[in-house]
Amino acid sequence: MKKFFSILAIACTVNIFAAPTLANKTFTWATDLKYPFFPKQKMSFVNGIVKNTEATALPDIDAAYSNKIRVDNLIFTLPNELCETMSACYKADLNRDKIPDYIFINIKVWNGRFAGQSDVGIFVSNPQKKYTFNAFEARHLEAEVINGKVMLIKYAYSDDNENFIRQIYTFDKAGYIRLYQAAALMVNRK
């Protein structure tokens, strides 16, 4: 029995059984994040085309789409197209190897309950002097420096479809994504 309580005490200390915290905050659009350690980058769309030539409403009227994006004289190929008015690129050293990594965000839902739902593509440098590609979908995205490392924070709806799960991700030297911490967030609906 003592062994059980010892394991329970350790598990609670490292947040395995993290108690839900209250989410009483306003989220910023993932394309409008402002952190000094996570600067927004200028993108150019390689061979971008305007798909909605007959559109009459924003956000994508006269907007180019492409899956090849140039940033800092590098060309990145993403699995899905980005829309120039609904996307952003940020630069940070996610795995602390002193080589910049690139985070591409494309917001795919602009209104309703799922406004802000985005595809996130992350190119992280690896020892072979190439980039390892990681991707996830997020309801909201943030970044934070924890223990000297830039980490991405993903918010997604939990299985109850009302509350959020807050997941913090780090990246290893090979460029692969690793879950650092996860916790439930109860939404304040006053």
Image (tube, rainbow, N blue to C red):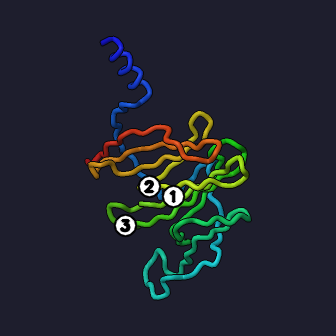
Question: How much space separates mark 2 and mark 3, taking CA atoms?
Answer: 15 Å
Residue underneath mark 1? 120
Q: Name the residue located 56 percent from the left edge and 43 percent from the top edge.
A: 151
Residue underneath mark 2? 138
Please state which amino acid type lies under the numbered disc 3: Asn
Question: How much space separates mark 3 and mark 1, taking CA atoms?
Answer: 18 Å
Q: Position of residue 88 (x, y in %)?
A: 57, 63
Image quadrant where residue 16 sits: top left
Query: Could you say which is closer to the camera, residue 79 or residue 72?
Result: 79
Q: Farthest front residue?
A: 128
Q: Residues within 10 Å of mark 2 (few under 14, many from 20)?
A: many
Please state which amino acid type lies under the numbered disc 1: Val
Query: Could you say which is closer to the camera, residue 30 or residue 97?
Result: 97
- Mark 1 and mark 2 residues within 8 Å of each other at the beta carbon: yes
- Mark 2 and mark 3 residues within 8 Å of each other at the beta carbon: no
Which comes before the other along the chain, label 2 or label 3? 3
Which comes before the other along the chain, label 1 or label 2? 1
Q: Is residue 75 visible?
A: yes
Residue underneath mark 3? 111
